[in-house]
Amino acid sequence: MSGGPDGLYSDVMFAPSLPVLLDCDPGIDDAFALAYLACRSDVETVGVVTTAGNVGQDDVLRNALGLTELLGMDAPVARGADEPLVEPMMTAEETHGPHGLGHAELGECRRRPDERSGAQLWVDLARKYPGQLVGIVTGPLTNLALALRVEPELPTLLKRLHVMGGAINHRGNTGPTSEWNIAVDPEAGHETFQAWGKASKRVVLGALQATEGIRLEERHRQAVADLGDHPIVAVLADALRFYFEFHQADGLGWCAYLHDPLVVAHAVTGRFATTRPLAVDVELAGTLTRGQTVGDELGRWGKEPNVDLLCDVDAEGFIEHLISTLGKGLKNLR
Ligand code: RIB
Ligand code: CA
């Protein structure tokens, strides 16, 4: 099934081991995204970059190393920058827990980070897999922006770029109009959208109006806890319980919005959402709206679209797919 207007995804099944780089800020929903990738036998996660966001760089790096070790993923994990490009660092321990995985404890981890920076790993992998690497960012865009400054050809080197971020003509979850990943580093968002536009390429963007359709309920929380005896299950279940507690404390009820896995699943399957083209940029100067992701729905800028925006999300179908993929995949992990 084609997943987008310009045939983003061929009808042919992806060749085995689609190479993927995940740039993330684990982070509870990022942890689910990593586990999902580990459970996909048609995907090879060839690199992980950690970006400070949900929690600081030390914690996101420790979490990414521990999660990939637990999941048997031997992809290099590269430490990203400690700070955003311009914006002072902000983190969200109230949402993701003191160290980023809610109530979960990862314990000792033997894995060490790759010696390269996150930006260098982006560049090296894009050059190693020219036209084949799918880049996915589920945190702030800091390290992708730094990589673009090293290798401006990234938009044409990558097969596709998928990003979880922004809230377009939809309320924010950080400021009144801003979504977390973009709010943490607005300049990086601006530089990314500009670079893709300049290269006449489009970022596949999962914004809040799409990802908030993935609202886990108690029955889903139970299903995660019942995913079997792989050690990652307790980590995901303990993390998710904290996430439910946060959403309840935030007045949203006993639930959890699981943003990142939808973007990752769409990136590797082309399913669970359609896309529509849109010209997008990030507000940098607004006193009330800095960090807002703006979509030019009426074409007032006279610019070509630089985004394929996820829409028409099949939320129930995706949640079922996520839980069944984890259920089946975890049984096969070493
Ligand atoms: O706004 C949601 C995004 O911010 C998700 O990626 C979540 O992990 C946080 O990073
Ligand atoms: Ca994230």
Image: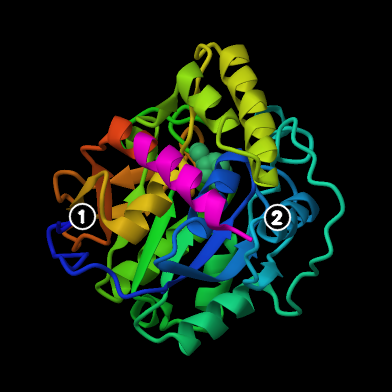
147 and 186: which is toward the camera: 147
Magenta span: predominant SS is helix
Residue 290 to residue 255: above or below: below
On the rendered structure, is 39 left or right of 155? right
Q: Alpha carbon of mark 2 to alpha carbon of mark 1: how far? A: 47 Å
How many marks overall?
A: 2
Residue count near mark 2 (Cα–Cα under 10 Å), binned few <14, some 14–19, many ≥20: some
The x and y percentages for residue 81 are 70, 64
Say what amino acid the circle numbered 1 marks.
Trp
Q: In the rendered view of the protein, which quadrant contains the N terminus?
A: bottom left
Q: Residues within 10 Å of mark 1 (few under 14, many from 20)?
A: few
Q: Residue at x 26, y 50 (%)?
A: 271
| Residue located beneath label 1 in the image | 301
Residue 24: percent from the left, percent from the top? 58, 55
Q: Work out whether mark 2 precedes mark 1 in sequence or the reverse, and give the earlier one.
A: 2
User: In this orientation, which residue lies closer to the viewer: 229 or 210?
Assistant: 229
Label 2: which secondary element: helix
Start and end of the magenta stretch? 320-334
Above or below residue 175? Residue 147 is below
**Where is mark 2, residue-wise?**
70
| 318 left or right, relative to 117 | left
Left or right position of 175 against 318: right
Residue shown at 69% from the left, 36% from the top: 234
Q: How is the image coloured?
A: rainbow
